[in-house]
Image: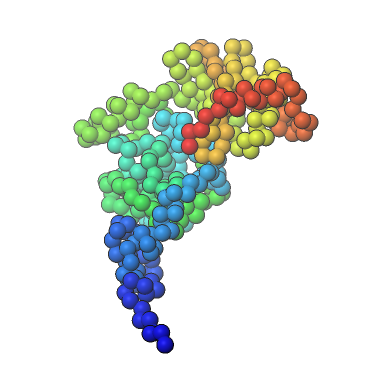
Amino acid sequence: MAKKRVPTRANRAPQSVRDGEVPVVGAREPCPCGSGRRYKACHGRAAAQAVTELVQRPFEGLPAEGDWVALRELVPAATAPLTLREALPSDVPSVTLATVLPMAWPALRRDDGSVLLGLQNDTSSGDISRDLADTLRRALTAEPGAPVQSRRAPADGPRLQDLLDPEGAFEPVVHAGFEFWVPDADNASAEVTASLERANAAAIPTTRLTGVDAAYWCEAAEKNHLRWVMPHGEERLLDALARLHAAGTSGLGEGTRLVGSFRAHGLTVPVWDLPSGTGADDIEKPAAEFAERLAAALAAEAPLSADERRARGGLTNRQVTLS
């Protein structure tokens, strides 16, 4: 007769911790749930899976998804007020998204209690939205005047889509520099001042168009560019761009040229070269007219012609992936 197996500390079922949540610890440390196993072999499995699984569209479902992608990948200096689903703590007057913060801090709780959340930071998991939500929650309770440090977000933690008001407006303001970091630059620390000077020196002049969504003009050394984050499915969008390109109507006016596109966070971003003298105001009307041509091309259902297929192949060959 086989002996009755007595459960050991190592193979007992995990026990609930007091507050119902299992804290995140080092992979080789004992799991806080009390199972006796290492964290990586117990509750850390879900966290490890979250680290390796990439969320292709982390900003999907947020208002103005294209602008979130642009501020993450394209725009040097910008801010946007954020509206949360729940009321802010009484000592937090506002929450503002910022492209970059001093010393690449993930977030900053200012002396007046307001919160700045940095968008262009390295993240520890495959879900940028979850990492940002974790940083935001910690910033709301941080000490005034203190930055919030990075950490690995809990795998079962909320995402930005859970924290932000889905009906709240998302209206980015593009800045010429990073002076928004500090209310009084003259009294900033030497470390912040040095970081501010480096950031301002590297910033590329950028303007958000007002007549179309998520399109950003930028000034480069030899020629200017328009980079336009579009919400359409990639295959459908490439077909539409190919139709316009083959017809000679993919440009934005004289001397402009659609040169390709790139992928960023699940969306496609067509890029146009513009003459160096073409400013953001000059491209507003051509961009609005292009949007009308694109809408018609997106609605077309006929198979691509031979010329359109060649145009599509050229656009695909010039496509790169940023994230």
Point out residue 13 in the picture as x, y percentages from the top left corner.
39, 73
| Farthest residue, direction front | 1
Quick one: 81 or 218, which is closer to the camera? 218
- To which quarter of the image does residue 110 belong? top left
Q: Can residue 171 be seen in this view?
A: no
| Farthest residue, direction right | 302
Q: As displayed, is residue 160 above or below residue 28?
A: above
Q: Which residue is drawn at 63% across and 38% down?
A: 233
Q: Is residue 60 left or right of residue 40?
A: right
Point out residue 10 in the picture as x, y percentages from the top left corner.
33, 71
- To which quarter of the image does residue 260 belong? top right
What is the quadrant of the N terminus in the image?
bottom left
Q: In this view, does 243 lie to the left or right of 234?
A: right
Quick one: 9 or 299, which is closer to the camera? 9
| Farthest residue, direction left | 190
Q: Is residue 125 visible?
A: yes
